[in-house]
Image: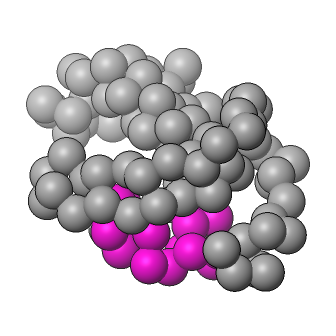
Amino acid sequence: MSNKKETQKVPSWFKGMVLKESEVITNPNTGESIELTTIEVAIYDFTMGSDRIAKTLDSKWLNSMKQEDLNPKAKEFWQNVRNGIGWFREHNAKAYMVLLD
């Protein structure tokens, strides 16, 4: 791993756990895989979990796209998704392109 990845810090907005092993993650849509550091795995899992929760909470809005159908409880989870995507764009653009783009 590069020195940059070894010095990655957990962002202040992150509310998850960081485990001790890196992992190879596969994009379920494309089949492409990439190895992530422990922090990257944690942020990826947090981002994808937040995405699933937000979509579940906002399922009515996703079907109608009407402002009145937005679920206010989903706002925090959509923000987590934006934070995770932004973090990957800044810290590992290749992983962003493989997994999140």
**Most common SS among magenta residues:** helix
Image coordinates of residue 94 in percent, x first then y, are 44, 78
Look at the image and give the residue range highlighted in magenta: 87-100
**Residue at left offset 57%, top offset 36%:** 46
Position of residue 101 measured from the top left corner of the image (x, y, whole percent): 31, 68
Please name the residue shown 33% across and 36% down the image. 67
Q: Is residue 90 magenta?
A: yes
82 is higher (above) or lower (below) than 55: below
Q: Residue 42, image x and y in percent?
A: 62, 41
Towards the viewer: 14 or 1: 1
Residue 81, placed above or below residue 72:
below
Residue 45 horizontal side relative to residue 21, left or right: left
40 lies left or right of 93: right
Residue nearest the viewer, comparing 65 with 54: 54
Residue 32 shows in this picture: yes
Residue at screen point 71% across, 34% down: 19
Query: For residue 31, which quarter of the picture?
Result: bottom left
| Residue at the spot 61% in from the left edge and 32% down from the top edge | 76
Tell me where residue 53 appears, x and y as whole percent: 42, 23
